[in-house]
Image: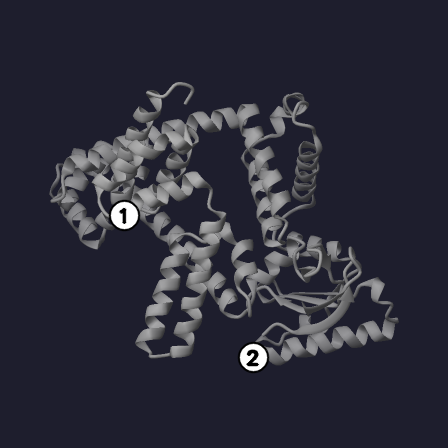
Amino acid sequence: MPKTTRVALQCQNCRQPVNATVQNVVDAKADPDAKMRLVSGRLNTLPCPNCGAVNTVLTPLLYHDPAKELLISFVPMQVGLKQEDQERVVGDLVRDLMNELPNEQRKGYLFNPRRALTIQGMIDQILQADGITPEVMAEQKARVELIQTFLQTPPDLLPDVVRQNDTKIDERFLQTMSVMAQRMLQDGQQQIAEHILAVQGALVELSSFGQQLAKNQEVQEATVREVVSAINALGDQAQRSDFLTLALSYAADDDRLQALVGLVRPAFDYEFFQELTLKIGQSPAAERETLETLRDRLVELTARVDRQSQALIQQAVSLLQAMVNVDDPDELIRANLPLIDDTFLAVLTANIEEAQRRQDIAASARLKAIYERVLVVLQDNMQPELRFVNQLLSASDDETAQKMVLEQAVHFGRPLLDVMNAVGQMLAQRGERAAVEKLVFLRTMAERVLDTVPNQ
């Protein structure tokens, strides 16, 4: 368990008293989330309940990574401890850490921790141990500084600034902006997060990389629609042999092959690969190499989809555990809205069912309360177009959904099509074939409706 300390402090902004629980020991193996909070500057930070300002609490800290036999201590100069008192504090933290470790893990490096003079110095040592060189950190710093420049640039001057820095805007640059926006949301700074995302959207429109990204996305969407159409043509009684024939037709087109696996991952099961292996053995020698290459690629793609799904599930489990362990989950729900998706809701529902099966009334009630709060927050924060798309997908029948599109699409205009594209891509990545098919049809209908309306 991480060592924590209760502290009382004044808010740096409004000077009101704030009570906080700070973490003094970070173990990278036992608590990887704490490591991520540390290196991203979010460890031991809390929003003031009075004014919302984010306060950073400087406290003695011990970082441990047993895989790298790395132990780093940090005692802030601001706490004003004498040398002998610093050594005593660090010694106490090391002793607490060792008490949590089994005997075989108590090695010599634990008795001689490295020292960091600043929290940034500790972070630098951690990143260097992870193989992130000073050059890489310098590049990241330059990216952050340029992002700050973009955020502070008036909208009318932004196109010129983008042109001057066009070659610096790439995938990693936009990913850094997304991470920054997520951190702001987690810290309760929704307005700042929205500004970051708005500027990010402008960069996508104005930069060469963003324009190429948009073109690539159009191609990907067209590919997904084509593969969906081919799957539909197989009919509801499609057999494994039908999916093998379709996969063979995409053997030389990896984009379509990836889309196929993403859309119908369950079709590529153990029996499918048994049948494919049998077919390889029965095929003429001239055809075997093509079939073997296809089999290897399908194994790789299905494993990738499974890893992505498992990572999403683990992320959802960790988030749910955090919600269960706080008195009021609303703030945590709002701070993690981008992570609350169908996977999270499925994990939450499964936990509710398991609690009911065990007849654990307290756990069941707690989980149900979280489920209700999640739905309320999602509805409150969902953009109108996305809310409408969800209503379409949950309509009682196809006729009702089609009627909703005919009657209401004009109220949302063309932004509705962009949202439907984004949702369709997400559903395709999750392999939700039926939902993708339904949404593709409804999007086509919505586009036709909007084409008949002037200025839409």
Q: Residue 168 falls in which quadrant of the image?
A: top right
Let me know if residue 168 appears in the view: yes
In the picture of the structure, the residue carrying the numbered disc 2 is 102
Task: Point out the tag, 1 or 2, that comes first from the N-terminus.
Answer: 2
Position of 102 compared to 142: left or right? left
In the picture of the structure, the residue carrying the numbered disc 1 is 265
- Give the Cα distance between marks 1 and 2: 42 Å
Q: Residue 448, percent across and down? A: 30, 24
- Residue in view at x 67 percent, y 35 percent: 151
Secondary-structure class at tag 1? helix
Secondary-structure class at tag 2? loop
Q: Residue 82, percent across and down? A: 88, 71
Position of 246 compared to 216: left or right? left
Q: Residue 75 falls in which quadrant of the image?
A: bottom right
Its colouring scheme is one colour
Q: Residue 437 falls in which quadrant of the image?
A: top left
Q: Residue 265, percent across and down? A: 27, 47
